[in-house]
């Protein structure tokens, strides 16, 4: 079966309604029912609760609080590297941006301009730069951390579709990561200049949140929203938490030309852990 046919049902199902419903259910505090769902999820996906700051599943009043659980101290030591991997998950793709084109999967690419919500002045800063697309599966730790020090300058909410972001969908839906709902976080670093972390939504991803704003979506107004931040208003250190997904998704990072040389051990589909070495300054 072709990849296009495999994802055809996603064009037909009511993705927005399913996502709203999933968000409500995940936020519900239903006592024993909630605990039962969490217990099923842990068994189904092999979640390692020994890593959690709170390993007792009965201590989580809602599925969202379980899903965005903190890790125990020392569970993710930070590597001695210029750039750290910001999430647990798997590498979807990474490498050089070809002018303004980002490789998605065989036969598919998309533009930096589309990814960041149509801002050409922002997108051009990453022409011929570097990108990394990292996929978080249901079993993974779902907090997102900083790959390097950064001062937040802008945040852009971009409305969009809510396709799944799993590898099959990435191979079957053109321009997937520039079509789905997303939150674009723009940072500045003294040594490398601007860089971007894009939190990409997906089917049943109830919401995305950042540490400085809280929940960004919902609401879902159907139009681009922007926030600007004064110098020094939000500064985060390498390894600090910057956001989280309430149900899993994908992070896309953009860096300027010749600022990042990726870890030679990295390869598409490789499993990754937050805090491991992502690369060195180029």
Image (cartoon, rainbow, N blue to C red):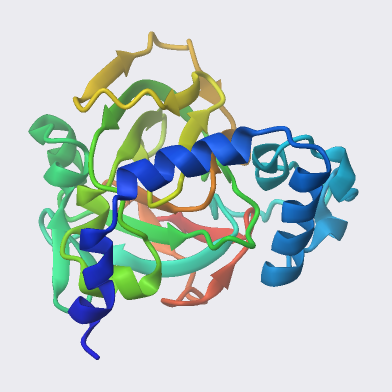
Determine whether, in the image, residue 46 is placed left or right of residue 152.
right
Residue 43 visible (yes or no):
yes
In this view, the residue in front, 126 or 88, is 88
Total count of labels:
0
Residue 211 lies, in percent from the top left, at: 56, 25
Q: Residue furthest bottom?
A: 1
Q: Residue at point 40% right, 47% down?
A: 18
In this view, the residue in front, 59 or 253, is 59
Residue 101 lies, in percent from the top left, at: 13, 59
Choose top left, top right, bottom left or bottom right for residue 106: bottom left
Residue 98 lies, in percent from the top left, at: 14, 62
Indicate whether 243 appears above or below 11: above
Residue 82 lies, in percent from the top left, at: 53, 50
Indicate whether 48 appears above or below 3: above
Quarter of the image with the N terminus is bottom left
Quarter of the image with the C terminus is bottom left
Q: Residue at point 47% right, 40% down?
A: 21
Determine whether, in the image, residue 189 is placed left or right of residue 170.
right
Residue 82 visible (yes or no):
no
Indicate whether 57 appears above or below 171: above
Q: Residue at point 70% right, 61% down?
A: 41
Q: Residue at point 20% right, 66% down?
A: 173
Choose top left, top right, bottom left or bottom right for residue 261: bottom left
């Amino acid at each position: 079966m072709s990849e296009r046919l495999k994802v055809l049902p996603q064009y037909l199902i009511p993705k927005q309604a399913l996502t709203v419903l999933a968000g409500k259910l995940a936020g519900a505090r239903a006592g024993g029912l909630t605990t039962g769902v969490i217990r099923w999820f842990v068994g189904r996906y092999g979640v390692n609760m020994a890593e959690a700051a709170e390993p007792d599943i009965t201590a989580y009043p809602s599925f969202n609080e379980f899903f965005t659980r903190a890790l125990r101290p020392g569970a993710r030591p930070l590597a001695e590297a210029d750039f750290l991997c910001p999430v647990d998950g798997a590498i979807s793709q990474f490498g050089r941006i070809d002018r303004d084109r980002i490789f998605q999967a065989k036969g598919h690419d998309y533009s930096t301009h589309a990814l960041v919500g149509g801002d050409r002045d922002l997108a051009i800063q990453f022409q011929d730069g570097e990108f990394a697309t990292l996929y978080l599966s249901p079993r993974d730790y779902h907090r997102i951390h900083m790959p390097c020090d950064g001062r937040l300058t802008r945040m852009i909410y971009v409305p969009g579709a809510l396709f799944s972001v799993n590898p099959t969908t990435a191979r079957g839906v053109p321009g997937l990561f520039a079509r789905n709902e997303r939150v674009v976080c723009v940072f500045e670093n003294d040594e490398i200049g601007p860089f971007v972390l894009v939190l990409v939504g997906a089917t049943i991803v109830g919401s995305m949140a950042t540490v400085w704003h809280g929940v960004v979506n919902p609401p879902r107004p159907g139009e681009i929203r922007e926030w600007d931040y004064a110098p020094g208003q939000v500064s985060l250190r390498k390894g600090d938490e910057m956001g989280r997904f309430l149900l899993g998704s994908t992070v896309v990072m953009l860096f300027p030309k010749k600022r990042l040389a990726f870890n030679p051990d990295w390869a598409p589909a490789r499993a990754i852990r937050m805090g491991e070495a992502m690369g060195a300054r180029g």
